[in-house]
């Protein structure tokens, strides 16, 4: 008899190492197989629930209209409203957004928050657009999605090249159509508009909390731990600052153009101030300027890729010289690289746990908006730490129990939770 699950798995064998959706599917397949996932549940969970493609006309400052292509993929709603960021970049693809939406489902399940997964993206180059063009782009994109988003349906958040201002525009556009203010439609908003204290720092803080747990496995203290961070934005910049503050020795950091390295450690607040004013790390005093690929190969205790996908591949995995890989970015490592890192004995804090601090505090923001009652920053941070540490322990225990790598354990933990809830609800087929 034909085995549809085996056929589907063959279809999803990754052919392109750098296709994020294939990379996600390959990991999903492995975990599903180890869990002995029911073939019906497998068929439902391996694909997104809905993919929307929208064409967004925007009046440019020149007076001409340009039509942009945008996406919103809603991967899963089994555990609650879909949740996920919106990315503005020239190289956004539907496959990337699909993968990111699935990672959101698994991420929310790993940290056990009652959300499904979604992601959005618009193909545009925000660096070439004025503030008012970005505002019109955001408002029209929101208008196109009105029927599909909502506090109980799908709750967007910031991602690469979108920020608190973008969320404020989405919230306002949605509220104008709803005829009343709906703060819980987005998270990552300005504090004054219903945002949560600690949300801006939450992803970087989550990276810190998971790294704190991982170094214990190597009997290291923060002061004995050297850290290399790729990326200096919301995740990398804030993560590096918080680690610096906790006494870690951050020896290298980069932005899209390149990075700086000093084996004695960098003064991260000073580096970030320099970057803010000069818009480049080049020329920073008492540090060597290195390329992003050289930066990844620096010998260190913790390597934290916090920029973008496909940074560690079969081409460079063999030259990675860290003890712990803390994946602040989504999908920085390909499945082929996973195998090499595992053979080298590198301990991976997988992205769907490592960078889950953002969505955890987004959940707290959504709860606070719906209560109309806001928490102190220390309460937010403490609740975040509890969730991140508990999830780290759960995942490490599962990895040991099944004798699998930590990424596979993370997928197993997540898929098991989503599959259980889907089964309890029943498949409306
Ligand atoms: P950001 O735009 O604030 O910063 C991105 C940083 O990476 C910048 O320093 C940029 O110069 C650098 N960068 C971009 N492309 C690069 C490339 N090709 N090579 C090297 N460096 C590059 O974005 P962010 O919010 O910090 O997000 C970074 C990653 O973390 C993304 O993968 C994102 O999906 C993920 N993430 C973000 C959040 C969040 O709350 N912001 C939460 C979870 C995951």
Image (tube, helix red, strand yellow):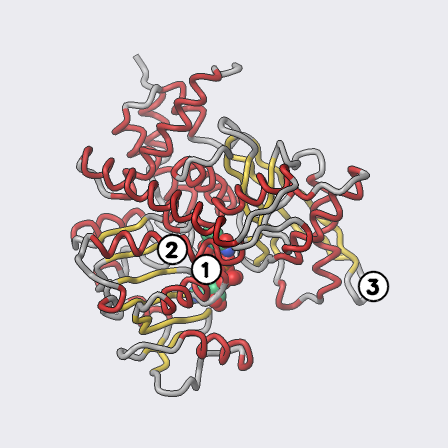
Mark 1, residue position: 235
Q: Which one is closest to the eye, mark 2 or mark 3?
A: 2
The vertical placement of 135 against 39, above or below, is: below
Question: Where is residue 290 drawn, in percent x and y?
Answer: 35, 77
Question: Where is residue 204 drawn, in percent x and y?
Answer: 43, 58
**Mark nearer the N terminus (2 vs 3):** 3
Which residue corresponds to the image point at 62% horizontal and 57% vertical from the top-left? 164
Q: Nearer the viewer, residue 237 or 95?
A: 237
Q: What element carries label 2?
A: helix
Which residue corresponds to the image point at 66% horizontal and 41% vertical from the top-left? 372
The vertical placement of 329 against 129, above or below, is: above
Q: Residue 207 carries which label?
A: 2
**Mark nearer the N terminus (3 vs 1):** 3
Which residue corresponds to the image point at 66% horizontal and 58% vertical from the top-left? 165
Q: Residue 304 carries which label?
A: none
Which residue corresponds to the image point at 43% horizontal and 49% vertical from the top-left? 382
Callout 1 crowding tier (Cα within 10 Å): few <14, some 14–19, many ≥20: many
Horizontally, residue 16 falls left or right of residue 104, namely left
Question: Where is residue 24 drawn, in percent x and y?
Answer: 39, 41
Q: Is mark 1 within 8 Å of ligand 1?
A: yes
Horizontally, residue 138 falls left or right of residue 398, namely right
Q: Nearer the viewer, residue 105 or 152?
A: 152
Q: Which mark is residue 63?
A: 3
Asked if labels 2 and 1 touch by Cβ distance under 8 angstroms, the answer is yes
Callout 2 crowding tier (Cα within 10 Å): few <14, some 14–19, many ≥20: many
Q: Is mark 3 within 8 Å of ligand 1?
A: no
**Mark nearer the N terminus (1 vs 2):** 2
């Amino acid at each position: 008899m034909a085995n549809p699950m085996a056929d589907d798995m063959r279809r999803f064998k990754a052919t392109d190492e750098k296709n994020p959706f294939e990379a996600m599917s390959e990991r999903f397949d492995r975990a599903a197989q180890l869990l002995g996932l029911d073939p019906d549940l497998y068929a439902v969970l391996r694909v997104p629930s809905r993919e929307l493609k929208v064409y967004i006309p925007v009046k440019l400052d020149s007076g001409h209209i340009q039509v942009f292509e945008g996406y919103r993929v809603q991967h899963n709603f089994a555990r609650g409203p879909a949740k996920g960021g919106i990315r503005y970049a020239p190289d956004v693809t539907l496959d990337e957004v699909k993968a990111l939406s699935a990672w959101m489902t698994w991420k929310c399940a790993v940290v056990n928050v009652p959300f499904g997964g979604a992601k959005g993206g618009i193909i545009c180059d925000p660096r070439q657009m004025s503030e008012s063009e970005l505002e019109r782009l955001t408002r029209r994109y929101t208008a196109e999605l009105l029927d599909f988003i909502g506090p109980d349906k799908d709750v967007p958040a910031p991602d690469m090249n979108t920020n608190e201002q973008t969320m404020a525009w989405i919230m306002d556009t949605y509220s104008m159509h709803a005829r009343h203010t709906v703060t819980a439609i987005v998270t990552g908003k300005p504090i004054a508009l219903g945002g949560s204290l600690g949300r801006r720092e939450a992803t970087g803080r989550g990276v810190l909390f998971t790294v704190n747990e991982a170094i214990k496995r190597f009997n290291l203290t923060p002061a004995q731990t050297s850290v290399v961070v790729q990326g200096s934005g919301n995740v990398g910049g804030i993560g590096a600052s918080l680690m610096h503050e906790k006494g870690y020795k951050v020896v290298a950091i980069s932005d899209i153009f390149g990075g700086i390295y000093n084996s004695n450690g960098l003064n991260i607040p000073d580096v970030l101030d320099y970057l803010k004013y000069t818009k480049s790390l080049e020329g920073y005093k008492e540090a060597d300027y290195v390329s992003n690929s050289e930066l990844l190969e620096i010998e260190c205790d913790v390597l934290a890729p916090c920029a973008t996908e496909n940074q560690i591949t079969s081409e460079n995995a063999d030259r990675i010289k860290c003890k712990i890989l803390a994946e602040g970015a989504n999908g920085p490592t390909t499945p082929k690289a996973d195998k090499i890192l595992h053979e080298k004995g590198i301990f991976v804090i997988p992205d769907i746990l490592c960078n889950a601090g953002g969505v955890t505090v987004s959940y707290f923001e959504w709860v606070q908006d719906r209560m109309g009652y806001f928490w102190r920053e220390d309460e937010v941070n403490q609740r975040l730490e509890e969730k991140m540490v508990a999830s780290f322990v759960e995942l490490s225990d599962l990895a040991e129990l099944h004798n699998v790598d930590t990424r596979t354990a993370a997928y197993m933990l997540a898929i098991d939770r989503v599959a259980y809830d889907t089964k309890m609800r029943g498949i409306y087929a």
